[in-house]
Image (spheres, helix red, strand yellow):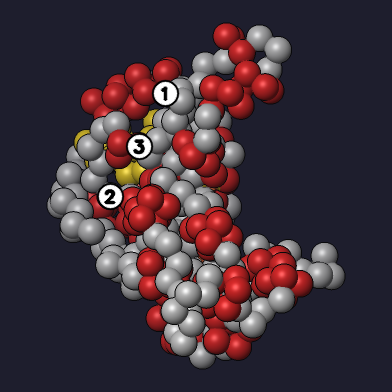
Amino acid sequence: MTSPPKSPLQPVDSLDRRPRLAVHKLSSCDGCQLALLNAGASLLRLAERFDIVHFAEAGIIDVDAEADIALVEGSVSTAEEAERIQTIRARSRWLMPIGACATAGGPQALKNLANAEAWIASSYPEPQHIDARPTADAVAAHVHVELELPGCPVSTPQVLAALASLLAGATPLAEQDKICLDCKRRGQVCVLVTQDAPCLGPITVTGCGALCPSLGRACYGCYGPAENPEVATLAQRFAELGLDAEAVKRRFLFQQSGAAPFQQLLREWHPKPRAGSATASVDQGSSMTSEDRDHSMISASGEDEDD
Ligand code: SF4
Ligand code: SF4
Ligand code: SF4
């Protein structure tokens, strides 16, 4: 990941006006906007420091407003959005996609792995009226962006910290650590080691504070790949836990299915035979029963047996 460019703002005290902030929405569930709305007192301070020119969830609507900083939630999934993101780019000095949808296509990018046209035809009686592109794309696939903040939803403290840096005329820091480092700092018990749960923490960038492992659950990678992720190595580890090749790929192809390292895994990865068994397939060599495997996948997907 390259470092983001310098802030387009002067330190706020030397400006003769408040910087303009816009929060745009493309195809999304609004969860990242809600994460901002839930900022409480910090949101009030944000409104004091910025002139918020567009933020539909907060009731401020001027979609064509010029902005110093524009946050964008959601993926580019329609022809109208493909045009609108160009306009947003042209009217924004600093463009910051927020959340898994805007940074990697989000859950809706799963359609990129299938025949989206056939899905639409099977779901709608008059599919010709559906304005949907064949793929759901990250914002950066269409326009230049200054910094991406991933997560599903995005981390509110991360967004506020980035905005505070920009206000001070400084370059926001892009996270580089992996979730495992958060676990170690917090003294958490590792669910991969102790429960054989297929945890994506070793290759996922931090930002959530190791939320899922702190609740005894495996990370499913909603913040996306960290720098230099050893994706194939972790996939092989999951195979050695007893997951078959399709189950392994499904662990990676979820909220961040559009991320390049996960796409590479989809194209290139095949499980290696287990050590000591030159010919055995992963399933043949596994000591995990199908019941064990189902349990592992269930706990990994965040559903408790008690739920
Ligand atoms: S990243 Fe997650 S929370 Fe944010 S808009 Fe997309 S689906 Fe919703
Ligand atoms: S629980 Fe997951 S994130 Fe935490 S240390 Fe283990 S593998 Fe890493
Ligand atoms: S632990 Fe993983 S899946 Fe859970 S919130 Fe953090 S990045 Fe997302």
* Secondary structure beneath label 2: loop
Q: Nearer the viewer, mark 3 or mark 2?
A: 3
Residue 143 vs 297, above or below: the answer is above
Q: Disc 3 to disc 2, how far (Cα)?
A: 11 Å
For this orientation, the residue located farthest to the front is 279
Q: Residues within 10 Å of mark 1 (few under 14, many from 20)?
A: many
Q: Quadrant of residue 275?
A: bottom left
Does the CB distance between marks 1 and 2 fall below 8 Å? no
Q: Amino acid at mark 3?
A: Val
Q: Residue at x 66, y 66 (%)?
A: 297
Residue 146's disc number: none
Q: Amino acid at mark 2?
A: Leu
Q: Which residue is mark 2?
A: 147
Q: Residue at x 54, y 72 (%)?
A: 282
Q: Which residue is mark 1?
A: 81
In the picture, measured across the screen, residue 212 lies left or right of residue 77, that is: right
Residue 139's disc number: 3
Q: Amino acid at mark 1?
A: Glu
Q: Would residue 199 be visible to someone looking at this image?
A: no
Residue 38 vs 23, above or below: the answer is below
Q: Disc 1 to disc 2, how far (Cα)?
A: 20 Å
**The CB of the residue at mark 1 lies under 8 Å from ligand 1:** no
* Secondary structure beneath label 1: helix
Residue 94 or residue 169, whichever sits in front: 94
Which quadrant does the N terminus fall into? bottom left
Q: Residue at x 39, y 60 (%)?
A: 269
Q: Residues within 10 Å of mark 2 (few under 14, many from 20)?
A: many
Q: Disc 1 or 2, which lies upstream in sequence? A: 1
Residue 217 or residue 37, whichever sits in front: 217
Q: Residue at x 66, y 9 (%)?
A: 126
Q: Residues within 10 Å of mark 3 (few under 14, many from 20)?
A: many
Residue 148 vs 217, above or below: the answer is above
